[in-house]
Amino acid sequence: MKEKRIIPCLDIDNGRVVKGVKFTDLIDAGDPVEVAKAYELQGADELVLLDINATDEGRGKMLDIVEKVAADISIPLIVGGGVGNVEDFKQLLESGADKVSIGSAAVYTPPIITECAETFGSSTVVASVDVKPYKGNIYSVYIKGGREDAGLEAIIWAKTLVGLGAGEILLTSIDKDGTRDGYDIEITSNISVSVKVPVIASGGAGKLEDFYDVFTEGGADAALAASLFHFGEISIKRVKQYLGSRGIRVRKVGK
């Protein structure tokens, strides 16, 4: 078994870390630089910064945050939100991101995935796939921060993104986001077995067992969490100690 990654996510709104439930009802969770530094000390393997209300006017502020966070941490940094073209992608990399997440833009203009992969390498391209159950075991892809059904079936879309050049899939279950009642094992497992790139599972972490389940039953390569970590209910160190005790290989355990 490959080493599994634990990745905290910092949703950024107006320069602050925020957290909500099902992409709504946001509350303040701290300063992004200080939160990022704390997570690295705890043993986070990577860090996600997501500009949840990205606009052209706010782009400069987000680039500034990326620069400050990147300067203060040594773990890989994934940045997303409002990436609409190759120039946005390039600016984030130049500001210190190691990988850039593309969501809605890939639906509107799929060749952006290929162009970014060819220009900057597939390892820098993280395709963000936000999903909701549609019927039975069929899931629909949503865009615009989970507000609009893109009319795409999740598994087919994930496979398409990998074919276009994406090096990783960030899979978020919208209905699980912030609920803390466990990851969506069904869609995580179905996509994990359907693509040959790493899958980051997101949405629903609430207890230690949820991380174990998403790795063993869900087949995820990494588990992302936010509110659980932000409000100090469980530390990343504790998650890794628990996983290690149950035979899951993890990277370094922090302080």
Image (cartoon, rainbow, N blue to C red):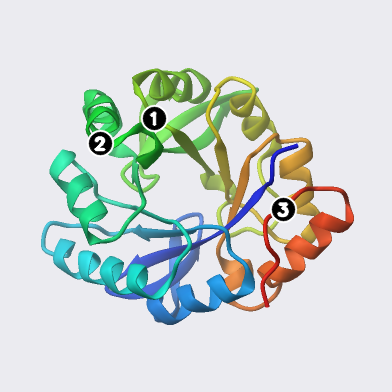
Tag 3 or tag 1, which sits nearer the N-term? 1
Q: Amino acid at mark 1?
A: Ala
In which quadrant is the C terminus drawn? Answer: bottom right
Nearest to the eye among marks 3 and 2: give it: 3
User: Is any part of residue 206 visible from this angle?
Assistant: yes
The relative height of residue 239 versus residue 102 in the rendered view (above or below) is below
The image shows residue 242 at horizontal and vertical percentages of 82, 61
122 horizontally vs 93: left or right: right
Total marks placed: 3
Q: Quadrant of residue 254?
A: bottom right
Give how far across and how far down residue 188 sits, in percent: 63, 34
Q: Which residue is mark 1?
A: 166
Q: Secondary structure at mark 3?
A: loop
What label sits on residue 250 in the rendered view? 3
Instruction: Name the residue beneath numbered marker 2.
Output: 105
- In the image, which is nearer the foreground, mark 1 or mark 2? 1
**SS of the residue under disc 2:** helix
Residue in view at x 47 percent, y 19 percent? 159
| Type of the residue with mark 3 | Val
* Dot 1 alpha-carbon crowd within 10 angstroms: few under 14, some 14 to 19, many 20 or more: many
- Assign a secondary structure to mark 1: loop
- Residue at 68% in and 62% down: 252
